[in-house]
Image (cartoon, helix red, strand yellow):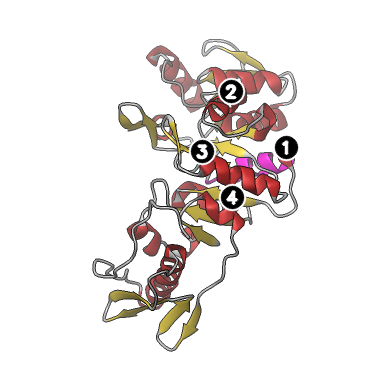
Amino acid sequence: MLDLDGVVYIGAEAVPGAAQAIGEARGAGMRVAFITNNASRPPAVVAEHLVELGVEAAVDDVVTSAQAAARLARDSWGEGARVLCLGAAGLETALLEAGLVPVRANEDAAGVVTGYGPDVPWRSIMRVAVRVRDGLPWIASNTDLTIPTAFGTAPGHGVLVEMLSRFSGVTPVVAGKPARPLLDETVRRVGGERPLMVGDRLDTDIEGARNAGLDSLLVLTGVTGLPELLAAPPQLRPSYLSGDLAGLARRHEAPTREGEHWVLGEWRARVAAGLLEVSSSGVAAAPDDAWRVAAAAAWAHLDASGTVADITAAGLPAPGRAAR
């Protein structure tokens, strides 16, 4: 299950090597699904964008938080229910495909489903806020506080959710990561014997996998950098770690402890006096192994001391280049 922005593409451009890595994963027998918390675009639009970037993708390969929210709505209110839809085309399409009837904010409804929609009018938001406060059941597609745009990082649907919650005193049922409905919906639609969540965000992708009881792979091509990774508490730690999607085709050895050091391949790491120290014994040492031993050492120190290791002089290779 591949998150999109920061994993497969960044904005309008594919992550270098992503298309090749996904093709190789499929060739090795992996079933690939593309999942997104963004509820604004229908799966067909997402698939078309991926194909434009050179990534093989069909409509059925894409699962969105809008689809997961529609499933929750149908399970809660029944097929054919009238649902107040506050969002964009992706949300309305998902409700229709689930056998529900999207209605406007001033119409009778069994409940409301909200999602990111850049053109949602304020009058509709006000009506929804009042109706939720007065008892209308509420499902939110996701709670992402930010969304990447062409003009920079902007407020996401989570900002609206926080505002509505503060006004109404109501906490919605959430479909998107880190809640598990989106991952459950993906497994239901796509199948797979050993589901793996692949993402670039600790607080949505990795925590979502843990909430769903699934393994996860963190790639370092998106928003999570080494400082965030090495300071992660247990619930935000990935099962696997790689510089990019090429890690799907590689064996992931676990670091082992030798005295005060964590060792893997040609890399060694320890935390001494609160400082993370990382060293290698060869010029061809794999960057992925460096990040793995660093994470093992930093997490062990955090769990034992309750403090985050100082990594400023660790000598780690910088993410952003393909691992070897």
Pointers 3 and 4 in contact (C-beta within 8 Å)? no
Residues shaded magenta: 178-188
* Residue 10 shows in this picture: yes
Residue 321: give x, y in percent of width and height.
40, 52
Q: Quadrant of residue 20?
A: top right
Dot 1: element: helix
Q: Are discs 3 and 1 less than 8 Å apart at CB? A: no
Inter-mark Cα distance, 3 to 4 = 11 Å
Q: State the residue position of label 1.
A: 189
Q: Are marks 3 and 2 in contact (CB under 8 Å)?
A: no
Circle nearer the N terminus (3, 1): 3
Figure check: 187 above or below 95: below
Q: Which of marks 2 and 1 is nearer the N terminus?
A: 2
> In the rendered view, does 3 fall on the left or right side of 59?
left
**In the image, is residue 131 above or below residue 188?**
above
Residue type at numbered disc 1: Arg
Inter-mark Cα distance, 2 to 4: 21 Å
Q: Which secondary structure, mark 4?
A: strand
Quarter of the image holding residue 59?
A: top right
Q: Position of residue 52 (x, y in %)?
A: 53, 26
Check the image and report above or below for 111 versus 55. Answer: above
Residue pointed to by mark 3: 4
* Residue at 57% across, 28% down: 51
Q: Do the residues labelled 2 and 4 touch (CB within 8 Å)?
A: no
Mark 2 or mark 4, earlier in chain: 2
Structural crowding at the residue carrying mark 2, measured as other residues with C-alpha within 10 Å and reported as few (<14), some (14–19) or many (≥20): many
Splitting the image into 4 quarters, where does residue 58 fall? top right
